[in-house]
Amino acid sequence: MGFFSKLFSSEIEYPPLDDKNPAARQVQSLRSSIEAIAEQVQVPIEVVPSEDKAYIFAGNPPKEFGVFWVDHGQVGSLKKLADERGMTPSDLMRLSEHLRKAYINSQSESRFSAETSKGKVTVTPSPSLLKEVQKIIQQDI
């Protein structure tokens, strides 16, 4: 196993994302942004895609993780969000806990693997997780 394959793959081997799955097209359309985030964080990532955006769990959710998103080509992160909103550390912890619960609630959802130039990523085409994460990120703390 190569360095990047080992670095970016999760411990669980998920089936490959079929090209006919709409999530494959969604991931492909956001590929450069997803790869940029993967290169920046250098930990396993899990992509929750939609038509024009994706939420990305980086690290080892639900234990230790960060969350990034790509929305119409713009990359966001919890750090940027906290800075923009003037969030306190306790606000950020509360937001992270809501994200952790949303992730835990989605653990029965189907997951797939997809290849990028940075290695494998996990893809979770879950409308319910997408909706919940979007709601959490957009709410005012």
Image: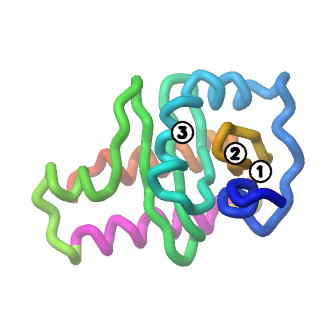
- Specify which label sits upstream in the sequence, 3 or 1: 3
**10 is higher (above) or lower (below) than 133:** below
Give the residues drawn in magenta, as a range.
Answer: 91-106
Q: Position of residue 22 (x, y in %)?
A: 73, 25
Mark 1: give few (<14), some (14-19) or many (20+) Cα within 10 Å.
Answer: many
| Residue pictured at 48% horizontal, 46% vertical | 37
Q: Earlier in the sequence, mark 3 or mark 2?
A: 3
5 sits to left or right of 100:
right
Residue at (27% x, 68% y) in the render = 92
Q: Nearer the viewer, mark 3 or mark 2?
A: 3
> What residue does disc 1 label?
111
Question: Label 1 sits on what residue type?
Answer: Arg
> Residue 67's image quarter?
bottom left
Q: Which mark lies nearer to you, 3 or 1?
A: 3
Residue 26 in the image, given as x and y percentages of width and height: 63, 26
Tag shown at residue 123: 2
Pointer 2 or 1: first along the chain: 1
Membership of 96 in magenta stretch: yes
Residue 138: where, in percent of width, then height?
A: 31, 45
